[in-house]
Each structure stands twice: as C-alpha cells, then as structure tokens.
Image: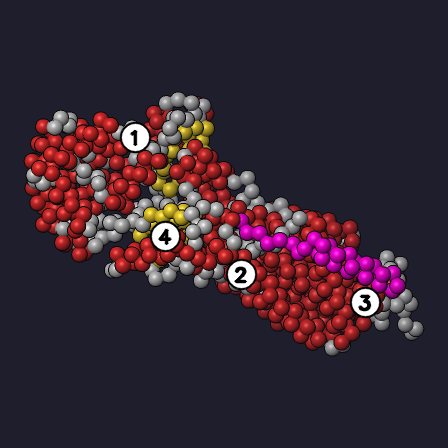
Amino acid sequence: MRKWWQLGVLLILVLVSAWGLGRIRFDTDPLAVLPDQLPEVKGLKAFQEGFSRDEELIILLEGEEDLPVRAEELTQLLLDAEVSESVRWQPRWREDPEGLAELFAWLWLNAEPEEVEALRARLDGEELEATLEDALERVATSMDGGSMMLSAHDPLGLLDHPALVQFFSAAEEAGDGFGNPDGTAHLLLVDAPGPLPGYQEAEAWLQRIRQVTEPWAREHDIKVSFTGDPAFEAEIGGAMQRDMSSTIGITSALIGLLFLLMQRRVPLLIGLTLVLGLVFVTAMGLAGWIYGELSIMAAGFAAILIGLAVDYGVLICQEGKVAGHDVGSIRGATARSIVAAAVTTAAVFLALNLSGLPGIAQLGTVVALGVLAGAAFMLVIYVPWVSRCGAGREQVGHKRAPIPARRGAVLITVGLAVGGSLVLVFGGLPGVAFDRSLLRPKNSAAMAGFERIQEVFPAWGDPALKLLIEGGQGMGERLDALEARLQSLQAERPDFEIRYQLPRGWWPSTEHLQGNRAAIEALAADAPRLLGAADEFGFSNEGLALDRSILEALPEVVDLPIGTLPASPAAAEFLRGVISSSETEPALLGSIEVEGLDDLGAEGFEPLRALSGEGVQLAGWALLKPAVLPLVKRDMTHVFLPMVGLMLVMLTLVFRNIRDVATAMLAMGLSGVLLLAAMKVLGLQWNFLNIAATPLLLGTGLDYMIHILLALRRTGGDIKAVWNGTGKAVLFCGCSTAIGFGSLAFASIDALASLGKVAVVGILISMLVSVILVPGVRARRRPLAG
C-alpha cells in the first residue's frame, strides 16, 4: 500500500519552504562572514555605521582640460534629471563660508579655557599690535604657500586652535579634495535620492546615473569611473546573484548530460530534474526562514547541494539495474545506504557550526538541511518514478570491472601514501592566506575606480588605522588614557614607527561650553576694535573676511543649546568626518599610522590590539588578517577533531564492524594526505572560506565509503557486482559533485572560486580512492556460490 502520508508531509514542507523564499536577502557586507565578537570586526562595523557614507556615490572624471567647469556642468545635469538628492563638485565651505565660520566659532566656545584665555591675551592691548606685526612678518617671509595664505586671511590668529591646526595641515596635503594638482582629475560626490536598502536598489540607481553620465562623457571625451559604497554593494550583490544562477545552470546542464550518457533514459532525467528542483526550493526556503540573509559564503550552497543530492538519484537508477524493477527491491537496495550517507553527511556539515566564522556555520546548516531533504525526496518520490520508467530492464551486473587486484591495489595505495607524505615532508603544508580582495568580485570596476582615485589623489590612499573613541561624559579622560597608551607603546616598542592624531576639542564639553561663554561674549563685543586695528595695519577687506565672519558667528554659537552642534551644511560636512553620525553609538574619530603594518606578525599585532578597550576601538582592514588567521588555525583543530570523533561514532553505528570502520578511516586519511600534497603542488592555499572544504570533503568521502562498503557487504565481496552497481553510481556521483564545485571555480567572488578549486581536487581524490582502491583491497573476484 502506498504511503500517501509521506507525500503529504513532503508537500507541506515544500509549501512552507516556498513561502520562505520571499525572505531571502543577500548580505553583501564582507564582514558578515566574520565573527561579531572579534574586536577588529566590531571596530570596522562601528566605523562603517558611524562614518561610512552608504548612499554616496563617488564619480571620478578624467580628462585634459576644463574639468572643474565640466564637473559643475555634470552636477547640474544630474540634479535636473532628478537622480540625486545633492551633488558636490567643490568643497562645501566654498559654497557656505558663513557655515565654516560658525564651526570655527563653536570650536573656540568648546576649547580648553586656558586656550581661550591665551587667545584673548594675544588680542588684548599692546599684545594685539604684536600679533598683527607677527602676521605681517609671516606673510612677507613665509616660503610655504599654505602658511602665507592663512596668515594673510587670519591676521587675528583665530585659526590658531589645536583642532584647526590639524585640520588645515591635512587640508594642505589634500588640496581642496575634489581636483588634483595638475587638473586632469576631478571628483563628484552624489547622494542617492532616497534610502538604498539592498543591492538591487543600489544597482537600479547606479544604472540611472549611468544613463545620464555616459552619453555626456562620450560627448566631451571624458573618462568616468564609479565607486563608493553603492557601487560596491551593487557589484557584489549582482555578482552573487549571477554566480548562483550561472552555477546552477552550468551544473544542471553538465550533470544532465553526464546522466544521459550513463542511463540513456530521458524520463529518468526529467524526474531527477523535478526532484532536484523541489530539493533546491526546500533548502532555499528553509534558509529564508532560518537566516533571512545569506552571506557571500552561503551563496555558493546551490551548486554544492545539486552535486550532493543528485548522488542519491543516480545510486537509485544504477542499483535498479541490478536489484530489480519494483519499488520494494530498489528501496531495499538503496534505502539503508542513502539514509546512512545523508545522516552522516548532514551531521558533518552541521559540525561546521563549531567554526568561529559565522559564514561557514551558515553554509553548513543550509547544506545539511538540503542533503536531508534530498534523501527524503529521492526515496519517497524518485524511487517510484524510476520503477515506473523502467530502470533495470537490462541486467549488467557481471561486466568486467576496471579495478586492480588486491596486490596491485595495495601497492598503489602504499605508493600514493608514501609519495604524498614525501611532498609534505620536503615541501611543507599548504600555506594560509587572507586578503580582503578575496571578498570582492574579480575585475571589480568599483575597486578599479577606487584604486585610480588613490593614484591621482594620494590623500585617499591614507593607510592610517582608525581610532573610535566612545562618546558621552568623560571624553577628555578617555583621550588622555588613550594618548598615554600610545606613548607607552612608542616607548616599549621603539621599532614601531607610529604617528597618531587625536581629535581634541571636537567633542562637545558641557564644562567648556558653559565656562567659556563670558570670555567668548567679551571677544565678540570687542570685534570692532580688533577689525579696526587690523585694517590700520594694511590688511584688506578680503583678508579680514574670514576673521570678521568668525567674530560675527560668536554670539550665535553662544546662544546654541548646550550639546548642540553647528547645523550649517559646511559645518555638518566637517563634523561628519570627526563625530559619528550613529545615534546609538556616538563616537569621535582619531587615527594612527604604523609603518610596515601589512608585514606585522602576531608579535607586532598584539601590542596594537591592546590599544582597544576602555572606550576605544581600533579599526582597519589591515588588522583583519592577523586577527582572522588564528581563527582559521583554531578551526582546523576545534572543528576538524570533533568531526573525526563524530565520523567514528557514525561509522560505528552504520557498520558495527571494526574492520569496515578501520578501512573507512584509513581511506579518509589517505585522501587527506593526497589532498594536502596536491594543494602544495598546485600552489593552492587555505583561506577563511575554502577551509569549509575540509568538512565538506569529509562528508562526501564518507558518503562514498558507506555506499561502497555496504555494497561489498551486500554482494558478499563480488567486485564485478559492486562495480556495475554502486561503483558506477559513486563514480557518477564524484563526477557530478566535482562539476557542482567546479562551477564555483569560475565564480566572480575569489573566495568562492578558491572553495571550488580545493573541493574539486579533494572530491576526485576521495572518489578514486573509494571506487578503485578500497574495492581492490577488500573485495574478491568471484561471486559466492549459490
């Protein structure tokens, strides 16, 4: 009697999973694959949340002449086309000098009281005359253009504020920040007209920008590049989507062709395709319910899952040729090995949750659920389909098997083990690499644009690490403590070449804002005398414009509520680069430069890492490599060793025979040695993603070993029967799974491509050891009598 309840349960599962498909989103942030508790990841996420400009597109214009004019022209085009909220082609302070004066006035109100008193002393009585004479002398004698310009436009010394000194020093190095010195490059900063919640919205907005920009650029013979967060998000998200669709298509087509060559029955292929579709929908939908967002790592699960799930279908078809035509016979020959293999493989993949990298854990869970669903669908739906379509019409159980005799198999096994071991002894183990370039698409236009900006605007190539100082009360104490730690680091490690900047004077201090009110009001009231004296010394109205604006802004900032920052566009533009825009985690931004940062080992990394804590976070992409490498090495023991124990338990439960368990473990060990040797010869390295291939290969290797050893036991060791039934099925399984992973080798994301390459090598090795060597060592040539 057909068990309709099984079909009913699977139908409900498919419907629920299909509903979960609508929840799937791709997380394009590379940090999503790394553990949140890692201080370096926390620091980068805090920096991105508070200081990154998620909805700002950067456009680089390159040409021979009139680029400022062309930049202004393109700005107007974009605004007229209503594809942006705002566009900046020049510094905000040029459009809003009064707003800049408001910021400078507020900084004096927020300054240390001693600094305010020193300013008043320089502008009082006879000291004012000395101050103005000093300004004239600097204008006359300065050999530095920036210093001369500041002296000519600031005779009263109102820009002689510690925070402003740092600002003008950086500004002098960067120019105006929008045009390079030789006039061959110019930048535009374009704000999106609305929120960009995902990569699809970013991609659509970028396309609208291109429709306006590219025809204009061709007309004026100007090269245009796009970069910035929206460009990266659109690029990475689109690449992930294309990778999934293309790998599914390529994998399905190649596996289908291979299946037809082996089975030569189109109805069997049609049924297999339909069942694989159900498996994919189920796994994808369950991922939607469990996670909602899929990381870069988990995006590669589709091809992996197809390669694994198709194995069970092929085994059913192949065993149907030997076991018989009816449903009961086919299930009797395949159910035990499919269930055992699926449960064992799923357990190994679930063990990926022990990893310290959340992206790997997510990949493991999704594939494990898909493998279990695949086994259920194959046994409940595909077995009756195979029986109805007529698999097994032709008995092929006693064709010659291309498997070496026992002596030859033993010699080959020993030779491979010795050869692989010699490669590792003399060549060493494969290296471990981590580079953030692994997380971006190949031939990234957004990255090429950003790197070009760094070439023509050296200030954009700033190698400094970021120091995020927690906001709130006690900012002065935190800055003092941080500076003490920095000075201590310099004293303890003289080999470190360190330069740092701490943003003193920028965080609102209630004590200063209240204590300086009277002095600032007196300075504002004294403005006529100060400006008159400067005029008598020969400073022009143009030279006094900035000081006049600052003095006029002093009464306005005094009237601001305590803790309120200047709100003018120019002031806000400067403040957003110093004070976090995050409402939940306000912070102040400093920086530290370390010579040779990329070459620091663990010994040099730890002293830098000690700067974090006590309200300070150190952030920088260069810190991720030394921070993540220990996690990768940890996973090799904390994930691999428990998996070995899990494998022993599962194999014991499946075989209940010490000889079979030992055979399986030794075969897995040989496969592991050969994989490491092959990686060394091919120049492949481990990284934070392809380390996932380790448990993945353990799972598939176990799968193959269970099928082969159970077939040997079921046939009494008849090597011909094993080869023409399970052996060919496992051979097909290995090839189909290698195709699934091989498609990842062409993925746009380098990290996914590395996973594909390592997995293909490992799967082919595991397949050949399982199908060729193990039966040769264990099997006999003649079937049992009777």
Q: Earlier in the sequence, mark 4 or mark 3?
A: 3
Report the magenta residues as a range. Answer: 406-435
Point out which mark residue 109 bears: none
Residue position for label 1: 144
- What is the crowding at mark 3: few (fewer than 14 residues within 10 Å), some, or many (at least 20)? many
> Which is nearer the eye, 589 or 5?
589
Disc nearest the viewer among 3 and 1: 1
Name the amino acid, label 1: Asp
CA gap, disc 3 to disc 1? Answer: 92 Å
Out of 698 and 184, give the one closest to the viewer: 184
Camera-side residue: 700 or 675? 675
Q: CA distance from mark 2 to mark 3?
A: 48 Å
Tell me the CA gap for discs 1 and 2. Answer: 50 Å
Which tag is nearer the camera, tag 2 or tag 3? 2
Q: Which residue is mark 2?
A: 631
Residue 423 is covered by the magenta coloring: yes
Give the CA separation, mark 1 to mark 4. Answer: 31 Å
Question: Residue at image x 61%, y 70%?
Answer: 642
Q: Hey, what amino acid is under mark 2? A: Leu
Q: Is 742 positioned to the left or the right of 321 in the image?
A: left
- Residue 346 quadrant: bottom right
* Residue position for label 3: 323
Q: Position of residue 42 (x, y in %)?
A: 42, 58
